[in-house]
Structure formats: structure tokens, C-alpha cells
């Protein structure tokens, strides 16, 4: 039986969770792989002030250089 | 009664509550059960076959139309020399970056976009997604141009090129399974080897190819032109979409920390193949070096395929044209997929090939929609296709460092990565790659701008 076909009515099946390991394919997912688990947001990280400053500097620099590339691109069209 | 167990390849661990099971879970777990079976029965080659995919696709997907044109341009303008060893070196850099995002995807089971958005905040998440959308759209236009140029060699129209590109995306999405999508695209990606065939057909001098690995002769001529080729060559090996794609695909495939060794083999195999085929494109282009190769504009008229036909024969031109079609088609599939992963992750809706279009409407709509928009651009009369194609890789190079820094931060986060955080060597190489990519992109961007506004001589 194909997995996708199996999945369609899977929720209604009774007793599948008591199957021995290896027989029931859902058993082979790590808990964090379930959609219900991976949909939960990960905790917010706290970046140090130095890291944030560095990230913003790099961000602004990349935007400025991107604008230069885009300006050059448009100028060369004329 | 034990109602639920989660496993790490057979290690049974009772858990407290049972998560609801979706069709996506079922589809992924069937793939995982095959991996488990291959591992427990020590079927090593079968296990490798099952776990190959995201790394090879990311690397060969990046050997796209603009990239192969960039490599061929390197050869046509400078001959064999500096750029021949540079390509493998750049793919070694790409391996370091791609291994990191594969590892993050396998350990956290999440894509890059959602991790950045949730872990570092919406500002950084949407900046990353915005960079990706911009560079992906520009690059996808270049991919359609590549298909158009390849098909033009066979006198097939631009409308047909646009239709074929979008039809390929729709066809590969029609199975509702990640595994099916991956295997189809993997099969197509291996035809990137056409560039190696093109290199053989131009009958290169093997001694000259081997000698060029000493990085000589160093290219001379216009500094700005050299910087453009350097930036676009760097942009041809490491780009934002590869990060989104490989991390998202590794999670979608269901890879776990137990698969990291095979994930590395997959990524390394992709890097080696991509470097060989990239050097192949350069060698094919280098045959034009002594035939006014520097005057060839890759996307003007029939470009390289026609030039190769005149210099090295019809077979070389035909194979190169077929290679451009293949490179463009595979990149359309992988880049559209990375856009879809990013859209689904950042909006917070389902983002897996293991869902049906009805279950993941935004994911599928983004996948097809971005390809359709890019296809429409190449049909606009008088659109600056040549300039778009040449600048696609440069823009990716300029915007890449921020994505790489966030990726290195993620890979060093113990709360997310546990025992699989970066080593000191990972970090040292990662920082060196970020500095190199940043310098290459900035050097071209600033130099071109200053010349354009006449602050330095052109």
C-alpha cells in the first residue's frame, strides 16, 4: 500500500499504535518530525548587543551595495 | 497501554502525549521506515541511495544557466588558467555552507526561513525571505533565458521555452510526495554532465588543463570585467536559495541526526559533480579564447552554442545548447521549491511536498507562481534579458553574507543544535567564506557604481 493512500484515512484506524516497531511506519518518525511538533515555534534567542550591531552593519552594507548594483544595472540599460 | 512511541532509528522512547498524525507525517514516515529497514539490515548502498538527494540537488541546481554561462565566459575571456582551480575551490566553500544547513535541517527538522523568523525575530526572518524572493525572481528569469537560448539553437520559440519551463514545474509537483519530486529532479540533474561531454567534444589539451591548476596565468585586462566575472563565479557556487532549499529539503525528506554522515556524502558528491561539470563548461568556453571569445555575449543572439558550433563543430554546439536547457530546467525546479519553502515557512502554513495541493495551497501556489512570473518576463518584448542574466549571480553574491551569518549563528546555537553545533574549524572556514563572498560582491558593486557615476575612470 502506498504511503499517501494509507495516509488518507489513517486517523480513523484503531489500534495501530500498539503495533510492534518496524511494522507501523509512523513509528519511525522522531517526535520533533511530526507536523504538530515542528509547527510549534522555537524559543526566541537573545542576541548580544555586539552581534546585533554587527548584523545591522552587514545588513545596511549589503542593502547599499545592492542598490549600487541595481543603479549600475539600470544605468547600463540606457 | 503505551499509545505512542517516537524513535531514533529503532531506539524506543516512550513519550508523554501523542501528537496528532497528519497525512504528511504518514508519507514521511513511510520514507523513514525504508531508511530504518536499510540501516538495520546493513544494506549500505541502498541506504545511501535513499538518503542521497538534497545535497546533489542544491549543488547541481546551482550549476544553472547563468552559472554555466559565467564559467564559459571565464574560459572564453581568459582561457584555461586562474578560473579552472577557482571553481573546485568555490565548491569546497559551498560544501562548508551546505553541510551546515543540511545539519541544521536534519537536527531541528525545520527550514531556514522559519528558524530565523522564530529564533531571531520577524525583522531578520522577513529580511532573509525578501532577499531570497528578489534574488530568486531575478535568477529564475535568467533560467528561462537559458532555456530560451538553448531552444533557440533548435529554432524553438520563446513562448515554447516559457511554457515548457512552467509545465516542468507543474509536472514534478503532481505526485504529492517529496520522494517522487526529489527522484525526478535528481534524474534530470545528472544530465548536467552534458557540459563535461561538451568539454570532451572540443578536444582540450589535457596538459594545459592540468597545468592551469597552479592558478596561472592570472587574468589581466579590465579590472571591472574581472570583478564582474569573479563576483558572478562566486555567485554561481554559493547563493541564498541553496541555503533555504537544502535545509528545507533535508527536513522535508525526514533526515535526522543519525543521517548526518550520509548527508555529508550527499553534499560532497554534489560539490564534486558540480565542480567537474562547471570546469567542463569553462573548458568548452575556453576553446573560444583564441577565436575572439572575449566578444561573445552569452545571451546575445544564439551566444555560446552557436559560437561553439562554428569553432568546435555541430556536436559541441548541440550538447552545450542541451546543457543550457537542462541547467535552466533543473534550476527552475529547485529555485521555485526554495521560494515555496520560504513562503510556507515565513507565513506559517504547511510547506512540504508530502502534502497535496489542497493541503498546502500557498506552498504549491508559490512554487508555480514564481516560475510563471519569471516565464512572463522573458516574453516581454525588449526586456533586458542579457543584463538581467548577468546581474542575477552578482546580486545573489551581494545579499548572501547576511544569510550566511545567520546560518552560522543557528549552527552554533546549543539550544537548537545540542551536540551537533559547529566545531571551531567549521566556524573558522564559515567566517572566511563569508568574508570572501562579501568582498567579491562588494568590490564589483562599488567599483561599477563609482565608474557609472564617473568618480573613477571607466
Image (tube, coloured by chain):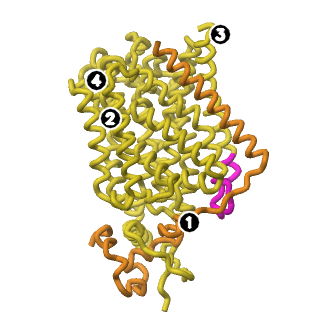
Chain colours: A orange, B yellow
The residue under label 1 is A40
Check if mark 3's residue and mark 1's residue have beta carbons within 8 Å: no
Q: How far is the residue under mark 4 from the one under mark 2?
A: 11 Å
Q: Which mark is residue B194?
A: 2
Q: Residue furthest top?
A: B457
Disc 2 versus disc 1: nearer the observer: 1
Instruction: Tell me the subunit letter for badge 1.
Output: A
Q: Residue at image x 48%, y 56%?
A: B250
Kind of element beneath mark 3: loop
Q: CA distance from mark 1 to mark 4?
A: 52 Å
Crowd around label 2: few <14 · some 14–19 · many ≥20 (10 Å): many
Q: Are marks 4 and 2 in contact (CB under 8 Å)?
A: no
Using the image, determine if residue B42 lies above or below residue B15: above
Magenta segment: B410-427
> Quick one: label 2 or label 3, which is nearer the N terminus?
2
- Would you say residue B264 is visible in this rendering? no
Where residue B317 is drawn, which disc sits there?
4
Mark 3 burial class by Cα count in 10 Å: few <14, some 14-19, many 20+: few
Query: Residue B92 at x, y = what percent?
Result: 55, 40
- Sequence order check, earlier mark of 4 and 2: 2
**Residue at the left extreme, as displayed:** B155
B196 to the left or right of B265: left
Residue B359 horizontal/vertical position (percent): 37, 61
Amino acid at each position: 500500500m502506498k504511503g499517501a493512500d494509507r495516509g488518507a484515512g489513517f486517523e480513523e484506524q484503531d489500534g495501530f499504535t500498539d503495533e510492534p516497531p518496524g511494522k507501523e511506519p509512523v513509528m519511525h518518525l522522531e517526535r520533533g518530525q511530526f507536523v504538530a511538533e515542528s509547527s510549534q515555534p522555537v524559543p526566541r534567542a537573545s542576541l548580544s548587543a555586539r552581534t546585533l550591531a554587527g548584523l545591522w552593519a552587514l545588513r545596511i552594507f549589503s542593502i547599499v551595495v545592492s542598490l549600487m548594483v541595481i543603479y549600475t544595472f539600470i544605468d547600463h540599460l540606457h | 497501554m503505551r499509545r505512542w512511541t517516537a524513535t531514533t532509528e529503532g531506539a524506543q522512547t516512550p513519550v508523554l502525549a501523542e501528537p496528532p498524525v497528519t497525512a504528511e507525517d504518514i508519507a514521511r514516515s513511510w520514507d523513514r521506515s525504508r531508511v530504518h529497514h536499510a540501516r538495520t539490515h546493513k544494506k549500505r548502498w541502498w541506504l545511501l541511495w535513499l538518503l542521497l538527494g538534497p545535497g546533489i540537488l542544491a549543488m547541481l541546481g546551482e550549476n544553472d544557466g547563468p552559472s554555466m554561462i559565467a564559467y564559459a565566459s571565464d574560459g572564453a575571456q581568459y582561457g584555461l588558467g586562474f578560473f579552472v582551480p577557482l571553481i573546485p575551490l568555490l565548491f569546497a566553500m559551498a560544501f562548508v555552507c551546505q553541510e551546515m544547513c543540511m545539519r541544521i535541517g536534519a537536527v531541528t527538522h525545520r527550514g531556514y526561513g522559519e528558524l530565523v523568523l522564530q529564533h531571531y525575530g520577524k525583522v531578520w526572518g522577513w529580511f532573509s525571505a525578501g532577499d531570497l524572493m528578489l534574488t530568486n525572481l531575478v535568477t529564475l528569469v535568467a533560467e528561462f533565458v537559458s532555456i530560451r537560448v538553448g531552444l533557440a539553437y533548435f529554432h524553438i520559440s520563446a513562448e515554447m521555452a516559457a511554457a515548457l519551463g512552467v509545465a516542468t514545474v507543474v509536472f514534478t509537483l503532481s505526485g504529492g510526495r517529496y520522494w517522487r519530486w526529489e527522484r525526478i529532479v535528481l534524474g534530470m540533474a545528472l544530465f548536467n554532465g552534458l557540459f563535461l561531454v561538451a568539454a570532451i567534444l572540443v578536444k582540450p589539451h589535457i596538459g594545459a588543463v592540468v597545468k592551469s591548476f597552479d592558478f596561472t596565468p592570472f587574468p589581466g585586462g579590465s579590472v571591472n570585467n574581472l570583478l564582474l566575472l569573479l563576483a558572478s563565479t562566486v555567485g554561481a557556487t554559493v547563493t541564498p536559495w541553496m541555503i533555504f532549499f537544502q535545509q528545507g529539503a533535508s527536513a522535508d525528506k525526514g533526515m535526522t541526526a543519525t543521517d548526518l554522515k550520509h548527508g555529508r556524502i550527499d553534499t560532497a558528491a554534489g560539490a564534486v559533480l558540480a565542480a567537474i561539470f562547471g570546469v567542463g563548461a569553462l573548458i568548452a568556453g575556453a576553446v573560444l579564447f583564441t577565436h575572439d571569445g572575449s566578444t561573445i555575449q552569452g545571451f546575445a543572439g544564439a551566444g555560446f552554442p552557436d559560437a561553439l558550433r562554428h569553432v568546435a563543430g555541430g556536436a559541441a554546439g548541440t550538447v552545450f545548447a542541451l546543457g543550457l536547457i537542462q541547467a535552466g530546467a533543473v534550476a527552475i525546479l529547485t529555485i521555485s521549491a526554495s521560494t515555496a519553502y520560504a513562503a510556507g515557512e515565513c507565513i506559517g502554513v504547511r510547506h512540504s511536498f508530502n502534502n497535496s495541493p489542497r493541503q498546502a495551497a500557498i506552498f504549491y501556489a508559490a512554487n508555480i507562481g514564481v516560475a510563471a512570473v519569471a516565464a512572463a518576463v522573458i516574453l516581454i518584448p525588449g526586456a533586458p534579458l542579457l543584463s538581467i542574466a548577468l546581474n542575477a549571480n552578482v546580486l545573489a553574491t551581494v545579499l548572501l553574507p547576511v544569510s550566511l551569518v545567520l546560518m552560522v549563528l543557528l549552527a552554533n546555537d546549543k539550544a537548537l543544535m545540542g551536540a551537533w553545533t559547529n566545531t571551531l574549524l567549521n566556524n573558522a572556514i564559515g567566517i572566511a567564506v563569508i568574508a570572501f563572498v562579501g568582498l567579491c560582491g562588494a568590490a564589483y558593486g562599488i567599483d561599477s557604481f563609482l565608474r557609472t557615476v564617473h568618480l573613477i575612470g571607466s
